Structure formats: structure tokens, C-alpha cells
């Protein structure tokens, strides 16, 4: 009987355990020549207390190799050095990483501040990688208000949708940049993340109220691609990424502002297609294509309610560039 009761208690305990929150690593910079970390409270670097730490890469030479005669390229090494606020210099071993944990206040880099820890290490480009490591939900608090402004779009349900999309994106892309030592970057090439000083109460509420919620398809996180601007309608993923999935299909994308402003333009263009084609030679010349013999535009089939065109640039009977052009925008 006693063993039976213990077994029941173990089952109840296991059933009520909260899943461990993932820790994410965000690449703040992958090509820094120098990094300075500051904080209002002392923090520790390589067992030394400081309020500032400046990291740089320095070319080092083994004294024994230098004394032996002419140097070879293999004798040269780039080492990461750290200058503390007492002007002392620390040198990391080859391949070493410096981890900085907060000491009671946020860690700061330039004008931004971050929750969690920061890590600095050298890379094969002889520059520095700067990584912010923190719990996933804290990370989202620095993403959601930068991807969907809570000032312009002060609607909690819209911000909740953004929180779910951002959470799904990071869950699916954990380890995307593992060769660089982090999961995802901090720019719009991944998700815009500006840290603690950009957090907003309404956006944080959206993150909190959707905690742990992600969008899935076939039991896996979806490829939660999103953008700030869609031009009125999104495109099928299969036409852009050659990925045919039922949740990334063309859909109407219109936002009706509570106080809409009339569209104004200094130009009057009756035919946008003709206007774009007239402009293309100048654009390509600016990009170094000076002797394109002709431009050929072939109208293709109707796609998702719009005309699509294929653009082919020919240079002396050889193809320079061929592929789908942008959609034909029509004024309403």
C-alpha cells in the first residue's frame, strides 16, 4: 500500500512539473572590431570584477617562434584581449570565450541594454562575435514591440498574434547559426531584437498571455515567416521559396487605419508597367550593366489575382539575368 501511494505521488509530481523554458542565443554582432560592455553594477569577467570591459582582437606572436628565425603565417595568432576599468589587460586563450553575467543591473552595449548574459569570442574572420543568452520569453519581450509597434497598433490581440509568430519562428530556427555560436540573428534577416530598453507594457502583456503558445503543422512548428509590409496581398510560398505548405498561401493583407490619410504623389502614372520598364535601363546601368542589348518582358499566367511578369536581360545573345519580376501594382 505504501509503495502504491508513493507511486501515485510521483505521477502527480511529474504531471505538474513546468516544462523547462528554452534558453536562446541571439547573435547581436558577428563582425565587431571592438565590443565594450558596461553596467551600473559590477560584473565579473574571467574572475575579475569590473564595470566596463572592452574586447578587441590582437595579433600575437609566439616569442619562441620569433626567436627561431623568419616567421610563417602559422606562427601568427589572433587573440581576444579584454581591458577592464582599472586599465588591466586580460588575454583569452586561443579559441577562448568570455562570458559576462549581470551583477545586479542590465548589461549595456552601445545604447542598448540586455537581459541575461553576454558572450564575446573571436571568429574565423578575425573579428568578434557578440551573443546574448537569455530565456526565450524574455527574448520575445525585446522582439514583439520592434516587429509590431504597440504605439501604432495598440491592439492586444494583434500583438498576441505577433508574439505567437515570433515565438514559433525562434522555436523552429533554434541552432540556425550554430556554426557562428548562436541560434538566430538580431536583425530583420531573422527577427528584430533590440533588447530591454525597447520593451513595452502592452507588448509584454501579449507575450505573457500567450506564454508557450506556438503555431504548428503536422506536429511541428510552422515556418512562421512574416514581414512589416505586404503591398496589399501576400504571395504563395511556393512561388518564392519553392516550399508548398497550406499555411503559407496568398492572402489579402490590408490594414485600415482608424484615421486614414489620403494617398498623395507628385507623379501621375497611367501605366505602371510601362513606367517601370522605362526606368529599368537606368537602374541596371547603375549596377554595372551598361550594354544590355534589350529587355524582354513576357506576360505569364495570372497568379493570385495579379499579373506576373518574367524579366530577361540579354547581353549580346547571352542571358545576364532572368526570373520573376515584381508584381504589377495597380492603383485603386
Image: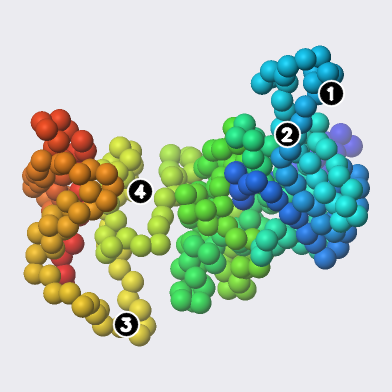
Locate the C terminus and report the quarter of the image it occupies: bottom left
SS of the residue under disc 3: loop
Pointer 4: residues within 10 angstroms few (<14), some, or many (20+)?
few
Q: Residue at x 48, y 40 (%)?
A: 219
Q: CA distance from mark 3 to mark 2?
A: 58 Å
Label 1, secondary structure: give it.
helix
The label shown at residue 59 is: 2
Using the image, determine if residue 32 lies above or below residue 269: above
298 or 173: nearer the eye? 298
Q: Which residue is mark 3?
A: 260
**Residue 273 visible to the viewer:** no
Which numbered disc flags the more N-terminal residue, 2 or 4?
A: 2
Q: Nearer the viewer, mark 4 or mark 1?
A: 1
In the image: residue 56, left or right of residue 318: right
Structural crowding at the residue carrying mark 1, measured as other residues with C-alpha within 10 Å and reported as few (<14), some (14–19) or many (≥20): few
CA distance separating discs 2 and 4: 51 Å
Residue 127 horizontal side relative to residue 85, left or right: left
Disc 3 vs disc 2: which is toward the camera? 2
Q: Earlier in the sequence, mark 3 or mark 2?
A: 2
Which mark sits nearer the N-terminus, 4 or 3? Answer: 4
Q: Residues within 10 Å of mark 2 (few under 14, many from 20)?
A: few
Residue in the picture at 82% in, 49% down: 83
Q: Is residue 276 above or below residue 156?
A: above
Query: Disc 1 designates what residue?
Result: 63
At 74% across and 38% down in the image, what residue appears? 58
Q: Closer to the N terminus: mark 4 or mark 1?
A: 1
Question: Where is residue 242 shown, x and y percent of the image?
Answer: 30, 37
As measured in the structure, the alpha-carbon distance from the residue carrying label 4 to the one carrying label 3 is 30 Å
Q: Is residue 153 above or below residue 78?
A: below
Whether the residues at callouts 4 and 1 have beta carbons within 8 Å, the answer is: no
Amino acid at each position: 500500500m505504501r509503495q502504491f501511494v508513493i507511486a501515485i505521488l510521483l505521477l502527480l509530481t511529474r504531471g505538474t512539473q513546468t516544462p523547462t523554458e528554452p534558453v536562446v542565443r541571439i547573435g547581436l554582432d558577428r563582425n565587431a572590431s571592438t565590443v565594450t560592455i558596461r553596467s551600473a553594477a559590477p560584473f565579473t569577467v574571467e574572475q575579475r570584477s569590473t564595470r566596463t570591459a572592452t574586447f578587441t582582437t590582437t595579433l600575437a606572436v609566439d616569442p619562441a617562434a620569433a626567436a627561431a628565425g623568419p616567421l610563417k603565417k602559422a606562427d601568427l595568432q589572433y587573440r581576444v584581449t579584454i581591458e577592464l576599468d582599472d586599465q588591466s589587460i586580460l588575454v583569452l586563450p586561443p579559441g577562448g570565450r568570455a562570458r559576462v553575467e549581470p551583477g545586479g543591473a542590465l548589461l549595456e552595449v552601445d545604447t542598448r541594454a540586455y537581459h541575461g548574459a553576454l558572450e564575446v569570442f573571436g571568429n574565423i574572420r578575425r573579428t568578434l562575435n557578440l551573443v546574448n543568452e537569455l530565456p526565450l520569453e524574455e527574448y520575445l519581450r525585446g522582439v514583439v514591440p520592434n516587429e509590431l509597434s504597440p504605439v501604432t497598433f495598440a491592439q492586444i490581440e494583434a500583438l498576441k498574434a505577433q508574439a505567437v509568430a515570433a515565438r514559433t519562428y525562434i522555436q523552429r530556427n533554434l541552432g540556425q547559426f550554430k556554426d557562428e555560436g548562436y541560434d538566430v540573428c538580431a536583425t530583420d534577416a531573422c527577427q528584430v531584437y533590440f533588447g530591454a530598453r525597447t520593451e513595452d507594457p502592452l507588448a509584454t502583456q501579449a507575450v505573457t498571455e500567450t506564454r508557450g503558445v506556438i503555431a504548428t503543422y503536422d506536429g511541428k512548428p510552422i515556418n512562421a515567416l512574416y514581414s512589416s509590409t505586404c503591398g496589399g496581398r501576400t504571395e504563395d510560398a511556393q512561388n518564392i521559396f519553392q516550399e508548398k505548405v497550406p499555411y503559407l498561401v496568398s492572402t489579402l493583407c490590408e490594414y485600415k487605419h482608424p484615421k486614414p490619410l489620403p494617398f498623395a504623389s507628385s507623379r501621375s502614372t497611367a501605366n505602371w508597367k510601362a513606367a517601370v520598364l522605362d526606368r529599368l535601363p537606368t537602374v541596371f546601368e547603375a549596377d554595372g550593366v551598361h550594354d544590355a542589348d534589350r529587355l524582354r518582358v513576357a506576360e505569364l499566367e495570372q497568379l493570385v489575382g495579379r499579373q506576373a511578369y518574367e524579366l530577361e536581360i540579354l547581353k549580346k545573345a547571352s542571358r545576364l539575368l532572368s526570373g520573376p519580376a515584381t508584381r504589377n501594382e495597380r492603383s485603386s
